[in-house]
Amino acid sequence: MDVSSIRDEIENVTDAPSRPEGVEDFDATCQEDPSNVPQYACDIFRWYREREKIFIITKYLDRQKEMTKSMRAILVDWMVEVQESFELNHETLYLAVKLVDMYLMNNFVAKSKLQLVGATSVFIAAKFDERMPPLIDDFLYICDDSYNRPEFLETEIKILKAINFDLGIPLSYRFLRRYARCARISMEMLTLARFILETSLMDYELIDVLDSKLAAAALLLALKMKDMEWTSTLEYYTEYKEGELQDLIVHLNKNISVPPNKHLQTIRMKYSHEIFFHVAKIPPLKLSRNGRLEKAQ
């Protein structure tokens, strides 16, 4: 067997940053739990960091003559409703939104077909991430039978061809969970970061930000909202310094500071529930005159 290509690939893998003194080797503490795949976790997320550069999404609204930022936000809000209604994994939602953006980046979609693209993207993502994905008939029903089965199947084929059938897309949600676990963040703190991150899905201005960076910024903002610091552990596992995330957390804080209009209430209502620790009700930070975020008095 010729293993030269495998050997070259191994040798070309970028070494992980050396672990500073005092930073716990999280994966070493999980050796007895095979579900954590501790032997491979670092390599997996290093691979994700390389792969996210392949899936950069560029701004596309100048080529979508029948679509606006507001329409995209409403579509994403509806997709969150679908995720809740079918009780789908959050990974399914994030992958579905990625599929929508990747398809819209290179394909014109009429206003009347936007919901079809959104529903089909959730359907594809569910088949990738769920053990028991909903059926096509379920999706046709939630679309009020605005589309038929042949249209749905045709759109599925178009989306899969547009991404070259590559569904292994690094997602900000996966990065966030990894960061929180390695830093042993509480579930309430993780849920607050999830609320911030999920709100960012509706923001067209953030579609070209690396998922690893967006996840790190959401977690940093959540920490600041709870008077906690960006630690050396988080800097090591995210590979982002706090200063690199400042502009992004200001933007994310603005997103959760502006009251949503009546068409964009789903995420805020979702995270206002007791099961999500009422995190949507936590006051955002305020922007001081020197451009720094601080707790409101």
Image (tube, rainbow, N blue to C red):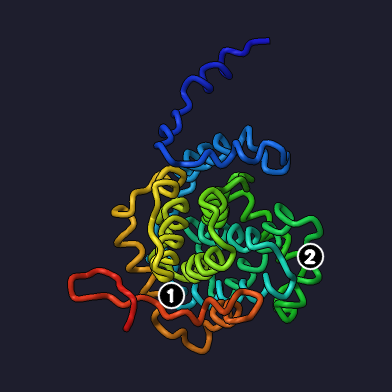
Work out whether 124 lies above or below 113: above
Label at residue 134: 2
Seen from the viewer's position, the closer of residues 257 and 3 is 257
Examine the rendering and report whether any part of residue 121 can be seen. Answer: no
Work out whether 149 lies above or below 165: below
Say which amino acid is labelled 1.
Thr
| Label 1: element kind | loop
Q: Determine the residue located farthest toward the top in the rendered image.
A: 1
Residue 224 falls in image quadrant: bottom left
Work out whether 66 lies above or below 178: below
Expressed as whole percent of the image width and height from the top left, the position of residue 208 reads: 40, 56
Expressed as whole percent of the image width and height from the top left, the position of residue 9 reads: 52, 22
Examine the rendering and report whether any part of residue 151 can be seen. Answer: yes
Q: CA distance from mark 1 to mark 2?
A: 29 Å
Which residue shows up at 61% across the image and 66% down it?
Answer: 117
Say which amino acid is labelled 2.
Pro
Expressed as whole percent of the image width and height from the top left, the position of residue 43 reads: 55, 34
Which residue shows up at 54% across the image and 41% down it?
Answer: 45
Seen from the viewer's position, the closer of residues 107 and 50 is 50
Q: Determine the residue located farthest toward the front in the rendered image.
A: 22
What residue did someone put label 1 on? 68
Judge left or right: residue 28 versus residue 22.
right
Which residue shows up at 43% across the image and 75% down it?
Answer: 68
Expressed as whole percent of the image width and height from the top left, the position of residue 150 reads: 76, 64
Judge left or right: residue 230 versus residue 105.
left
Which residue shows up at 25% across the image and 68% down it?
Answer: 292
Q: Determine the residue located farthest toward the left in the rendered image.
A: 290
The image quadrant where one finds the C terminus is: bottom left
The image quadrant where one finds the N terminus is: top right
Of circles 1 and 2, the one toward us is 2
